[in-house]
Image: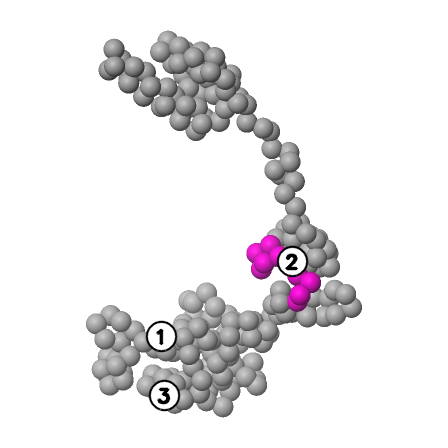
Amino acid sequence: MAECHLTHGLARKGQHHPLYGIWEMIKVRCYCKTAWNYRYYGAKGVAMCDRWHYDAGEFVKWCLSNGWKPGLEIDRFPDNAGPYSPDNCRFVTHKENCRNKRNNVLLTAFGETRTFAEWLEDSRCVVHEGGLRHRLFIKHMSLESALVSPHTHSHLATRKPRFQLTLEDEQVIRAELLGGTPQNVLAKRFKQSTSRMNRIAKRLRSELTAETITE
């Protein structure tokens, strides 16, 4: 391994070439039985060809001459169950790679069947990826509703309005603070959050200090 680093310049002074990281990642998923994703690759017979397995430089040369750019991902194609080898690999975007996964779930709406990634790109989809997942798998909305329902902010409508303090209220709070009344008790009495009461108390104390200095 050390010879490979020196010969091909893939890892010098702790700085690894991005393609060296991809090469290592493939070896881990194919041969390291303790890796979290081994069950999806090595356990199912997915391997790396000998030409690449034993020479990271060969892998890098192939990548550089076959369309690799930063941000692209390696994809096994045309045989998604086949090995990592020159005749069965290509570089694609993350979205394209997601479409080629064997565990893709096909979803149907409006009489059309597509992958999750493809529905995200549909012009009728009004939410981002996290929002669509939340609607489908947490709220259990139908796909059609999840795609087209406008954003709602009902939580804002039901939020209790914050009680506005008057000058008299602040004078009472100042007197109570001087008398030793805890801030959490005052927060509850005057319908304020604990953090807001802390800010109010801090301001009132600073004003009191300034008045004392002036006098």
The mark that comes first in sequence, 2 or 3, is 3
Q: Nearer the viewer, residue 43 or 170?
A: 170
Q: Quadrant of the N terminus?
A: bottom left
Majority secondary structure of the magenta segment?
A: loop
- Residue reaching furthest to the front: 214
Q: Nearer the viewer, residue 79 or 155?
A: 155
**Could you tell me residue 90's position as x and y percent?**
49, 83
**Residue plotted at (21% across, 72% down):** 13
**Could you tell me residue 189's position as x and y percent?**
51, 16
How many dots with numbers?
A: 3
Q: Amino acid at mark 3?
A: Lys
Q: Secondary structure at mark 2?
A: loop
Structural distance between the alpha carbons of marks 2 and 1: 35 Å
* Residue span colored magenta: 122-131
**Residue plotted at (47% across, 78% down):** 74
Q: Please, is residue 54 above or below residue 29 in the view? A: below
Q: Give the residue pinned by disc 1.
A: 18
Q: Nearer the viewer, residue 123 or 102?
A: 123
Q: Amino acid at mark 2?
A: Val
Q: Are marks 2 and 3 in contact (CB under 8 Å)?
A: no
Q: Quadrant of residue 194?
A: top left
**Residue plotted at (74% across, 70% down):** 112
**Residue plotted at (22% across, 82% down):** 6
Q: Amino acid at mark 1?
A: Pro
The mark that comes first in sequence, 1 or 3, is 1
Residue 61's tag is 3
The mark that comes first in sequence, 2 or 1, is 1
Frontmost of labels 2 and 1 is: 2
Residue 133's tag is none
Q: Residues within 10 Å of mark 1 (few under 14, many from 20)?
A: some
Q: Give the residue pinned by disc 2.
A: 126
